[in-house]
Image (cartoon, rainbow, N blue to C red):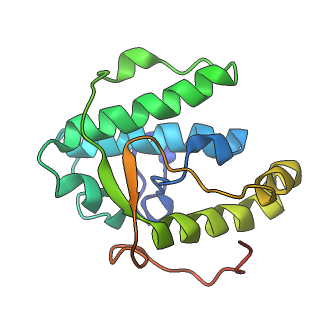
Amino acid sequence: MLTGLDGISGSNMRLWSVHPKYLDAKGLVALWREALLARKVLSGLTRGYKNHPQLLRFIVEKHPLDLINSYLFYVYKEAKRRGYNFDISKIKVVKCKKIKVTDSQLKYEFNLLLNKLKKRDYNKYLTNLKIKKIMPNRIFKIIKGDIERWEKIKNITNLK
């Protein structure tokens, strides 16, 4: 199994489309680290992960580095809201256009997250079960559509 910066496992990288507010503490910290790794990949500063499916939606865009920086900024904002001390100097704060995410992808990821939270943070799981409208990370614009072709679909319990 490949490992990248700080021992992050490539097979488990997840750049969540869902808003970071739905993540538990462990998930938010992992997202920050994984998105920083993605930033290194998109900057050409590491050789691994170049073909990771989670990066495809950034790579196909005109300014992938700006997009991942913007993505990281919204993760940072959520961390700051919770009182965490993420280092904003690790990213370049930029404004960029929104990219598309399908409603089915968002729903799939939310259900995947619910399954993880049910085992890892039951209180956050219960809180998220009350969500009526799933919000994306703010760099995404929701469109109608199927689960994204790059997604590695796992069998999950359909909770939402």
Q: Residue 114 in the image: x percent, y percent?
A: 72, 63
Q: Is residue 137 above or below residue 116?
A: above
Point out residue 95 in the picture as x, y percentages from the top left corner: 27, 27
Quarter of the image for residue 2 reads: bottom left
Side of 9 where 23 appears, left or right: right
Q: Residue at x 20, y 44 (%)?
A: 64
Q: Viewed as shown, does residue 67 lie left or right of 136?
A: left
Which residue sits at x=64%, y=46%? 27
Which residue lies most toward the left here?
A: 62
Residue 126 appears at what percent x and percent y?
Answer: 86, 55
Q: In this orientation, does residue 48 appear?
A: no
The image quarter in which residue 89 lies: top left
Would you place residue 70 above or below residue 17 in this image? above
Q: Residue at x 30, y 57 (%)?
A: 55
Res. 77 visible in picture: yes
Which corner quadrant holds the N terminus? Answer: bottom left
The residue at the far bottom in this view is: 155
Res 120 quadrant in image: bottom right
Q: Which residue occupies the foreground of this view, 111 or 152?
A: 111
Relative to 89, 64 lies left or right: left
